[in-house]
Amino acid sequence: MSVRNAILNFARCVIFTTAPAFPMVAGMRAAYQLMRDGKTQPLQDKVQQLIKYFLRCTESDPYWSKANEQGILVLPNYDDCEPRDFNAPIVSLKSRPRYIWWLAFHLLSSNISAVPVDYPAVSRGQGRIRFMFHAVNTEEQVEFLVKKIGEWAAEMMEIEAGPSGGKGKIPKAAQQVYTFMGSQG
């Protein structure tokens, strides 16, 4: 099942394309050569450290645990909380339908790049948002990411706890995006 999940999470470029362009192939060959020579190892180690730091930050954030219990924030590949020697540099976060888009709007309003992945790239109702960790990212950026996701989760929990149970209410960032889209005709 984990191979299937990996393909669903990371194979969008394979699903929606044909052959890679020649510059892309040249870049891949150069990257493989650098990896073979060991020149990328310090960068790979840094990415692993950042992902582990991200997971530690989510555990200490005041909103993540409650949002996870309510199904608002779910890190499906890290449910077992077992330490791993290797973590993929792309981290998926699942939420309820539409919520992934609202989280993406919230993060984009804070200049954080996040990729919502929805149907048909994944099964209907299995949407997720992906974050790509890079060796040039800093721990401060990881903390900022966790903080912004936590803020969004707190806003969603507040909306859901309202008198209508969240029906008809959307978060602030989504309101701004939809208002802008409406003004564009």
Image: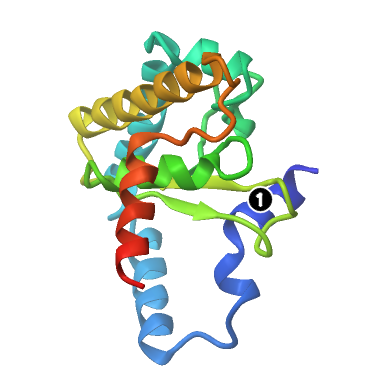
- Whether 10 is drawn above or below 184: the answer is above
Q: Looking at the picture, which amino acid does disc 1 mark?
A: Ala
Position of residue 161 measured from the top left corner of the image (x, y, whole percent): 54, 13
Q: Could you say which quadrant of the image residue 60 lies in? A: top left
Q: Is residue 76 above or below residue 135?
A: above
In this picture, is 49 found above or below 69? below
Report which residue position mark 1 lands on. Answer: 6
Across and down, in percent, residue 144 comes to 24, 29
Closer to the camera in the image, 27 or 165: 165
Q: Is residue 89 visible in this depiction of the protein?
A: no
Number of disc labels: 1
Q: Position of residue 19 (x, y in %)?
A: 56, 88
Q: Residue at x 40, y 61 (%)?
A: 36
Residue 159 seen in this snapshot: yes
In the image, is 154 to the left or to the right of 1?
left
Question: Which structural element holds mark 1?
Answer: helix
Look at 51% across and 37% down and name the residue there: 87
